[in-house]
Image: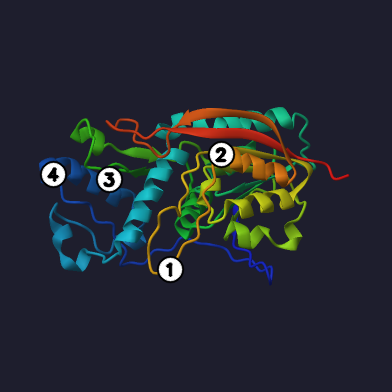
Amino acid sequence: MVEVFTPIPQQRKTRTVYMQSSDDDFINPPNNPDSEETLKRTRDEDNEQTPKRMKKKRVTSPHDWLDPSLQLHVPLVDVDKVRCIIRNIVRDWAPEGQKERDQCYKPILDELDRLFPNRSKERPPCCLVPGAGLGRLALEISCLGFASQGNEFSYYMMICSSFILNHTEVAGEWTIYPWIHSNCNSLSDDDQLRPVSFPDIHPASAGITEGFSMCGGDFVEVYSDESQEASWDVVVTCFFLDTAHNIVEYIEIISKILKDGGVWINLGPLLYHFADTYGPEDEMSIELSLEDVKKIASNYGFELEKEKMIETTYTANPRAMMQNHYFAAFWTMKKKQRT
């Protein structure tokens, strides 16, 4: 069982996050008249693995989803977030995502193994993984012999990661159709409607190190607390730095929570998430070049030990006609010893 909790910095309370469903919950298959038989099969397989509490309203024909009583009125922004989560399931927990995991996670795991060759089971090194998403990288680091904690802000991610980590009984237990809503750049209907099973491993049997946990909350709010200062041997950031409103603040906190001589391993682009956002509320976004990011890191006491660029994708459909590739910055920095 993986401990999933949400600390409140001021009161230091914890709260367990559970995945809940009511009898009225139902996932409706999209309308695709040209592939009706495939969708019927998809629907039947989904019904077979849907928990009993979710089967009160069950589709009995391919067009029953048109019944207004079966439709959920969900804001489009939430629909997009769920689709994002489904793609992340493939990236983190499906065999199809192995290539991306090899591109992004393997260099980090190899570097951790090189830097900490003599890991003690009694006192394993402590590693923080901000922006842990669905938890695969944090779990792999734990299996490597670290006391690993993943930190994630999104409740969508937290609920899904809790479900996978805590409620999976066997590998390949669940099946999804992650590309069913992607109508562009498909080579064939079969590619678009293909099933993907997950997880590719049974998390509880993966050999995690004692102390593995997932912490829910905003990185800045949780880890700027005084109790976190000089608490971590390693901080691993993977596709995380550019989620900041203020990347300088991220670097400052990473420096503060690392022990003297601690290591910061990073891999990712600088696709600043709040750049060019317009709305009723002004979203602050500080967008620095890679060169400036490294200069600021140096000002906060980091020494660059290793650096290279790694080409990778992110939640890409491996069979799509178009894929976005990143040339992600990969580095190892060490926090200088105080004199």
Residue at x 59%, y 66% (from the top left corner):
15
Quadrant (top left/top right/bottom left/bottom right) for the C terminus:
top right
Check disc 4 and report the residue beneath it: 36
Which label's residue is closer to the chain start, 3 or 2?
3
The x and y percentages for residue 296 are 66, 45
> In this rendering, does residue 38 appear at all?
yes
State whether residue 71 is above or below residue 319: below
Asked if one can make out residue 207 in the rendered structure from this viewpoint, the answer is no
Q: Residue furthest right?
A: 339
- Asked if residue 48 is positioned above or below residue 223 in the image, the reply reads above
Question: Rounded to the nearest whole Å, what is the CA distance between mark 3 and mark 2?
Answer: 47 Å
Q: CA distance from mark 4 to mark 2?
A: 49 Å
Numbered label attached to residue 45 = 3
Residue 338 is drawn in which quadrant?
A: top right
Q: Are marks 4 and 2 in contact (CB under 8 Å)?
A: no
Mark closer to the chain start, 4 or 1: 4
Q: Amino acid at mark 3?
A: Glu
- The circle on residue 290 is 2
In front: label 4 or label 2:
2
Q: Nearer the viewer, residue 130 or 125?
A: 130
As drawn, the label of residue 93 is none
Closer to viewer: mark 3 or mark 2: 2
| 269 with respect to 127 (left or right) | left
Q: What is the CA distance from the residue labelled 4 to the residue labelled 1?
A: 44 Å
